[in-house]
Amino acid sequence: GDSVTQMEGPVTLSEEAFLTINCTYTATGYPSLFWYVQYPGEGLQLLLKATKADDKGSNKGFEATYRKETTSFHLEKGSVQVSDSAVYFCALSEVGTSGSRLTFGEGTQLTVNP
Amino acid sequence: ETGVTQSPTHLIKTRGQQVTLRCSSQSGHNTVSWYQQALGQGPQFIFQYYREEENGRGNFPPRFSGLQFPNYSSELNVNALELDDSALYLCASSKVSGSGETQYFGPGTRLLVL
């Protein structure tokens, strides 16, 4: 079945540091890929998405490129802020299947120190 | 804000009881999905409803059931509660579009089973 593997956390960075959170996936078809962010005590917020190979999703300075050849969707940001501290989830959704469920990774806790 | 609302925000039940959680989807969305997120883990897909019919189910027992109403709002019912049912329950709404549909999450209901 489908699966998502994320880089283990927690990740601790200083403000303005470069961020990479690795995500790889296994899927039988051609999934859409997503990054969601969860702040303490809240639900999930969509951060960015990509629906086909070589697409780049971007939002709020975060970027991720859909790499079919390496089955990866790594999240990057050039300069993190304290307000980026949260848990980040990589997820996939198969297009066209009955019940387009999201399959999530385990999440990566990011802490940014001033 | 996504426009997806859930009630109640918190709930405490005892083992063996039954619980009903509610979700109002974002305007214009016709699909509702439910997820269970245990502490420190990624969300797990419970089931999805489209046009008032179950449209896909994850690996959850039959004591987890749901409904979708004509206005696309939804309920999640859990019978015979177990201690392991303690989790954050997330509802997500989306609009079926045939490609790369995006699910938007509510803030969740935190259930504690004692």
Image (spheres, coloured by chain):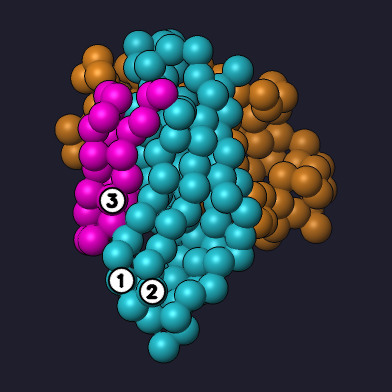
Chain colours: A cyan, B orange
Q: Is residue A6 visible in this depiction of the protein?
A: yes
Depth check, front residue: B79 or A53? A53
Residue at image coords 70%, 51%:
B86
Residue at image coords 49%, 42%:
A23
Q: Amino acid at mark 1?
A: Ser
The numbered disc on residue A79 is: 1
Residue at image coords 55%, 66%:
A11
Does label 1 lie on the same chain as label 3? yes
Does label 1 lie on the same chain as label 2? yes
Does label 3 lie on the same chain as label 2? yes
Q: Position of residue A101 (x, y in %)?
A: 46, 26
Q: Quadrant of the C terminus of chain B?
A: bottom right
Mark 2 → mark 1, Cα distance in angstroms: 5 Å
Residue at image coords 41%, 45%:
A74
Q: Is residue B66 visible in this depiction of the protein?
A: no
Dot placed on the residue nearer the N-terminal end, 3 or 1: 3
Q: Position of residue A80 (x, y in %)?
A: 34, 72
Answer left or right for A16 relative to B114. left
Per the image, the residue denoted by label 3 is: A63
Depth check, front residue: A51 or A21? A21
Dot placed on the residue nearer the N-terminal end, 2 or 1: 2
- The crowding category of the residue bearing disc 3, from other C-alpha atoms within 10 Å (few below 14, some 14 to 19, many at least 20), is many
Mark 2 → mark 3, Cα distance in angstroms: 15 Å
The secondary element bearing badge 3 is classed as strand
In magenta, the rendered stretch is: A45-69
